[in-house]
């Protein structure tokens, strides 16, 4: 592939994933990671680019959604999620070095379907959903578990935080805004761990050119996505998030099997 075309496609992936981040309150990795992988970037390095971009795109989205942020919930997400992300990234590097890429892809798919379940749990099991409340003793361990899962596929919890908060009966707009704020900090910690471990385990720990291009494009996309999100009805936000996650998880597992 021509180098210029390669970098243009990298930028388009950043723009699209940034739009999804601002639109749905996810870190954007649900789109960035599989598409970068399809483009030919090794899954573990796609993880690194994703982690590098999330703080910038999430900050832009959080600013746009700032009126709906629940700061107390965000703090609980950061406490539990930060620890889970760091541990998950360590495991991801071990899996990658052991050439267990299919296992990494499978974890990604499992996390994606858990996300969709969480989005609609209040409809699937309303009686149980009503008993779940957003308290410290539910959010912190939940965020740790979810970020351990997402860390193993190069994320920072952004794709699972909104459905997790919806599971705890948090309004979808507040769930999106709070998720964006929390992922700024969980992704920063995960990125530090990623580079530290990658430097020790690999000669090339991070793809800086691709990372900078995706970051710049993602920030622009996030601003656009946040604007559209604010104007969109909650039911369409839920449906759109579910469709995007399912489709891209299928892309990831297909590539891991056949490429």
Image (cartoon, grey):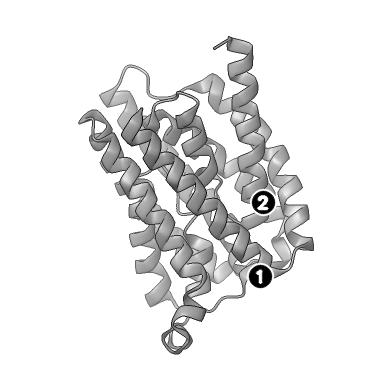
Taking the spot 65% from the left edge, 21% from the top edge, the residue there is: 8
Name the residue carrying label 1: 235
Q: Secondary structure at mark 1?
A: helix
The quadrant the N terminus occupies is: top right
Picture coordinates of residue 119, whole percent (x, y): 51, 68
Q: Is residue 221 above or below residue 240?
A: above
Picture coordinates of residue 60, whole percent (x, y): 68, 47
For marks 2 and 1, give the one nearer the viewer.
1
The quadrant the C terminus occupies is: top left
Nearer to the camera, 151 or 33? 33
Picture coordinates of residue 133, whole percent (x, y): 47, 82
Q: Earlier in the sequence, mark 2 or mark 1?
A: 2
Task: Confirm whether residue 62 shows in the render.
Answer: yes
Q: Residue lying at the far top in this picture: please name it.
A: 2
Name the residue carrying label 2: 22
Picture coordinates of residue 127, whole percent (x, y): 44, 90
Mark 1 neighbour class, 10 Å CA radius: few under 14, some 14 to 19, many 20 or more: few
Q: Is residue 29 above or below residue 233?
A: above
Taking the spot 45% from the left edge, 31% from the top edge, the residue there is: 37
Task: Confirm whether residue 134 shows in the render.
Answer: no
Taking the spot 73% from the left edge, 68% from the top edge, the residue there is: 233
Mark 2 neighbour class, 10 Å CA radius: few under 14, some 14 to 19, many 20 or more: many
Taking the spot 23% from the left edge, 30% from the top edge, the residue there is: 99
């Amino acid at each position: 592939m021509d180098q210029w075309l390669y970098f243009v496609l990298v930028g388009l992936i950043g723009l699209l994933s940034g739009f999804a981040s601002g639109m749905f309150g996810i870190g954007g990795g649900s789109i960035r990671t599989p598409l970068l992988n399809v483009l030919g970037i090794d899954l573990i390095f796609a993880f690194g680019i994703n982690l590098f971009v999330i703080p910038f795109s999430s900050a832009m989205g959080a600013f746009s959604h700032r009126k709906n942020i629940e700061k107390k919930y965000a703090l609980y997400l950061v406490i539990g999620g930060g620890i889970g992300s760091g541990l998950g990234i360590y495991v991801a590097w071990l899996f990658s070095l052991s050439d267990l890429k299919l296992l990494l892809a499978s974890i990604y798919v499992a996390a994606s379907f858990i996300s969709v379940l969480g989005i609609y749990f209040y409809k699937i099991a309303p009686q149980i959903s009503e008993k779940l409340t957003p308290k410290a003793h539910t959010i912190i361990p939940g965020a740790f578990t979810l970020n351990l899962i997402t860390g193993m596929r190069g994320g920072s919890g952004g794709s699972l935080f909104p459905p997790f908060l919806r599971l705890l009966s948090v309004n979808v707009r507040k769930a999106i805004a709070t998720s964006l704020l929390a992922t700024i900090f969980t992704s920063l910690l995960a990125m530090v761990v990623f580079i530290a471990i990658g430097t020790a385990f690999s000669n090339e720990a991070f793809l800086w050119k691709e990372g900078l291009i995706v970051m710049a494009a993602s920030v622009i996309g996030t601003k656009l996505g946040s604007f559209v999100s604010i104007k969109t009805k909650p039911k369409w936000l839920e449906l759109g998030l579910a469709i995007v996650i399912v489709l891209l998880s299928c892309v990831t597992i297909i590539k891991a099997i056949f490429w």
